[in-house]
Amino acid sequence: MKEADKIRKGDVRTATRLIRNIEDSIPEAKTAIKHLFPFTGRAHVVGLTGAPGAGKSTLIDSLISRYRKMNKTIGALLVDPTSPFTGGAILGDRIRLQRHAEDPQVFVRSLATRGALGGLSKAAGDAIHVMDAMGKDLVFVETVGTGQQEVEVMNHVHTVVVVMIPGMGDDIQAIKAGILEVADIFVINKADREGAGRLYQELMHMLDMAGTFAGGWRPPIISVDTMFKPELFHEGVEELSTKIDEHYENLVSKNLLGSRLRRKVMAELNEALQSSILTPILRKIIDSGEMESLIEKLIKKETDPYTCAEEIAKKYLR
């Protein structure tokens, strides 16, 4: 297939068009992914999640520079809120990571959430495959940044970096939302702010309470100063990149990469089943007016959601 061949050779224009088609659910995009899938699985995929304003984009920008100095090729997916006017990402790759725009070894793409929950776009998994098949050594994925419950990223990456900043109550939110369980690395960004020490102690306390860790990897806590202190900031980013590499090496050496891959493909299969089975059924019952009829019956208490679902399944899944 010419499209897949071009992408494997690193053709940016073809890759951009395919990711756009994936976002728009163009049927032909699935065919391209089928051809690309056997050539994926080589890239180290790193997710950065955390609250809005935590500085995830700034960290990715600096990590890209750091890895480019090591001659690594980079892909970056930035998930943003959906524009109510265009349906696309409100912030685009043209705004962020500008200084890498002229580097042919860096491919940046923004995705809109389009109603997806968990901090990612439904297109994220396939977009990662596209960048992986392009031959990128690392693929960074930034979640949308709407809240601390953004744990979906764990289903699509090898390494999860949770970015926090002092003074936002992140420690309490982390306990509530289970962020502790998904983090492979914690970053206290803007660590020169008041409250950084308390946040560090809270995280240490939570990690102490967690007991054992798979593969013996206890998530490290990296402090990164504000960019207004360039030398300290770059020292923090360098330490972060070192820990990202060490985490991947730990996954490989402790035979844990397979379990991450299993979790990833299970999530992708679940999404593919929903796309192939549930979405067409929903489209049919909406287009036929059956959905409105069922809603009216539910409001009048003439039936219940479980009975409706059983009847629909009986009708369409024969």
Image (cartoon, rainbow, N blue to C red):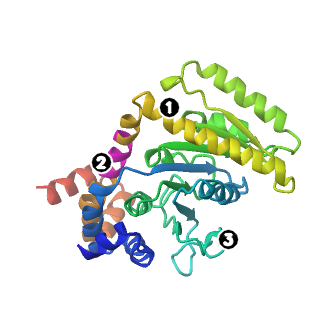
Whole-number angstrom distance, CA of label 2 to CA of label 1? 45 Å
Give the mark, 3 or 2, whose residue is nearer the N terminus: 3
**Residue corresponding to mark 1:** 250
The residue that disc 3 covers is 99
Whole-Å distance between the Cαs marked 1 and 3?
Answer: 32 Å
The residue depicted at 63 percent of the width and 69 percent of the height is 100
Instruction: State which tag comes first along the sequence, 1 or 3.
Output: 3
Other residues around mark 3 within 10 Å, as few (<14) / some (14–19) / many (≥20): few
Does 40 sit left or right of 154 as displayed? Answer: left
Image position, residue 205 (x, y; %): 71, 24
Q: Residues within 10 Å of mark 2 (few under 14, many from 20)?
A: few
Are the two marked residues, 1 and 3, in contact with CB atoms closer than 8 angstroms?
no
Residue highlighted by disc 2: 306
What amino acid does circle 2 point to? Tyr
| The N terminus - image quarter | bottom left
Q: Looking at the picture, tell me which residue is in the foreground, 261 or 69.
A: 69
Q: Nearer the viewer, mark 3 or mark 2?
A: 3
Q: Amino acid at mark 3?
A: Arg
Q: Quadrant of the C terminus?
A: bottom left
Magenta part mainly helix, strand or loop? helix
Asked if 197 appears above or below 29 in the picture, the reply is above
The amino acid type of the residue labelled 1 equals Asn
Give the image location of residue 10, x and y in percent. Answer: 41, 69
Residue 71: quadrant of the picture: bottom right
Q: Where does residue 270 sit, x and y in percent of width and height?
A: 32, 50
Element assignment for label 2: helix
Residue 30 drawn above or below residue 150: below
